[in-house]
């Protein structure tokens, strides 16, 4: 959500301008915010700041929902869902010609971290309120997502994203499996707890948690909460590992793409170094200090990241994957 406290002066200036446009009528807070957000949209597109673009769209959707403008909120939530499933994020590189070469390392989108937000329930409820069928929703989403993709060149196609959005919407009715029952003594409760609550029958605490595998909200006891904490840790570790592998693949691609340039710059060889901190596997340690001729380079075999690296345990050194690196060895110039 937008932090308007830090934009207080901007709000007051915009309010004064709108009052003139409204011929003396005092604009509402939402009128002022909406006007500022419209300007933000233009700035975001001009600067290709897509993670901010997503935040602005979501803020506008929330304003529309509060003002009961369901159609406008619905369209904006669809735009946000498309950006979220593309894993929109902050990045320093904005030119598509640059980041598309190595999207995981430098791009504004990281599909490995794709997800939808709680607004999915708003999309579902709006469909029911406005009588939008699933086929009509598909057509609307493909149209909206196509427009957004045309603006920001997101990598995941609208049709691919729709497949996942359809599953998420169908799953909304199943997301809340909280029952008015204590998970410890199984006695009936007067109401479904919404947070950490002590059972009036057995005195044990009840916790509201979300399962990582299906995002289902459940009521659990202390043991169940601890178990879900472990499952969430495993979930995030697996996702992190996937990202690390993708990053290593792109690093290898960068090294491979740069070989021709290295040769033109007078590079004769590469010197390998094992990771300077943490435990290093035996395969990587024996390559520490190894010098490889530029004409003999094989990324993954004799130049990091090594495919034979045995570091598959995050606890071993902080993360999985080969952490070795290399430096270039230039041709020695004769003394003059």
Image (cartoon, rainbow, N blue to C red):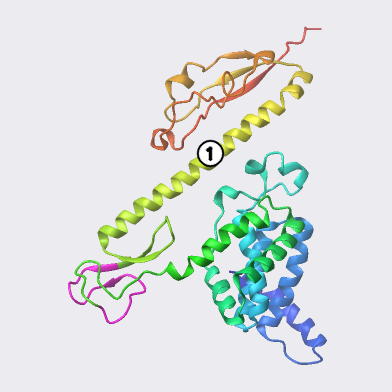
Q: From what the image shows, is residue 242 above or below residue 287?
A: below
Q: Does the magenta stretch include residue 148?
A: no
Instruction: State the image coordinates of residue 221 (x, y, percent, origin top left).
Output: 26, 64
Q: In this view, does 230 lie to the left or right of 291?
A: left
Q: Which residue is drawn at 33% across and 77% down?
A: 192
Quarter of the image that includes the N terminus? bottom right
Comparing 223 with 216, the one in front is: 216
Quarter where residue 22 is shown = bottom right
Mark 1 is surrounded, within 10 Å at the Cα level, by few (under 14), some (14 to 19) or many (20 or more) other residues, namely some
Range of residues picked out in magenta = 189-206
Eyeballing the image, is 165 above or below 133? above
State the image coordinates of residue 274 (x, y, percent, origin top left): 51, 23
Residue at screen point 66% across, 81% down: 30
Q: Which residue is drawn at 37% across and 69% down?
A: 177
Where, quadrant-wise, is the C terminus in this rendering? Answer: top right
Q: Position of residue 86 (x, y in %)?
A: 62, 54
Magenta segment, principal secondary structure? loop
Tag 1 residue: 244
Position in image of residue 189 (x %, y %): 26, 78
Callout 1 secondary element: helix
Q: Which of 138 and 66 is in front in this view?
A: 138
Relative side of 167 to 102, left or right? left
Evaluate whether residue 56 shows in this view. Answer: no
């Amino acid at each position: 959500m937008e932090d308007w406290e830090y934009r207080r002066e901007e709000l007051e200036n915009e309010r004064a301008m709108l009052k003139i446009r409204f011929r003396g009528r005092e604009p509402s807070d939402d009128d002022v915010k909406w006007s500022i957000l419209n300007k933000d949209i233009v700035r975001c597109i001009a600067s290709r700041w897509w993670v901010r673009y997503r935040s602005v769209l979501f803020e506008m959707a929330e304003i529309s929902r509060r003002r009961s403008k369901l159609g406008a909120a619905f369209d904006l939530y669809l735009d946000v869902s498309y950006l979220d499933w593309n894993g929109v994020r902050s990045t320093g590189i904005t030119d598509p010609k640059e980041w598309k070469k190595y999207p995981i390392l430098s791009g504004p989108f990281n599909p490995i971290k794709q997800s939808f937000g709680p607004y999915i329930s708003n999309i579902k409820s709006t469909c029911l309120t406005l009588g939008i069928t699933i086929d009509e929703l598909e057509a609307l989403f493909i149209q909206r997502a196509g427009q957004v993709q045309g603006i920001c060149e997101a990598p995941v196609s609208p049709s691919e994203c729709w497949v996942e959005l359809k599953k998420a919407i169908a799953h909304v009715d199943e997301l809340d499996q909280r029952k008015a029952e204590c998970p410890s003594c199984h006695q009936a409760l007067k109401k479904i707890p919404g947070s950490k609550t002590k059972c009036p029958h057995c005195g044990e605490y009840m916790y509201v948690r979300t399962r990582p595998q299906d995002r289902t909200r459940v009521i659990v006891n202390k043991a169940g909460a601890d178990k879900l904490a472990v499952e969430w840790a495993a979930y995030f570790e697996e996702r992190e590992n996937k990202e690390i592998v993708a990053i290593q693949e792109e690093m290898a691609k960068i090294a491979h793409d740069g070989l021709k340039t290295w040769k033109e710059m007078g590079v004769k060889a590469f010197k390998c170094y094992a990771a300077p901190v943490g435990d290093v596997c035996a395969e990587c340690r024996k390559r520490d200090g190894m010098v490889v001729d530029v004409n003999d380079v094989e990324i993954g075999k004799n130049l990091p990241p090594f495919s034979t690296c045995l570091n598959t345990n995050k606890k071993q050194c902080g993360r999985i994957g080969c952490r070795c690196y290399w430096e270039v060895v230039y041709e020695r110039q004769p003394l003059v």
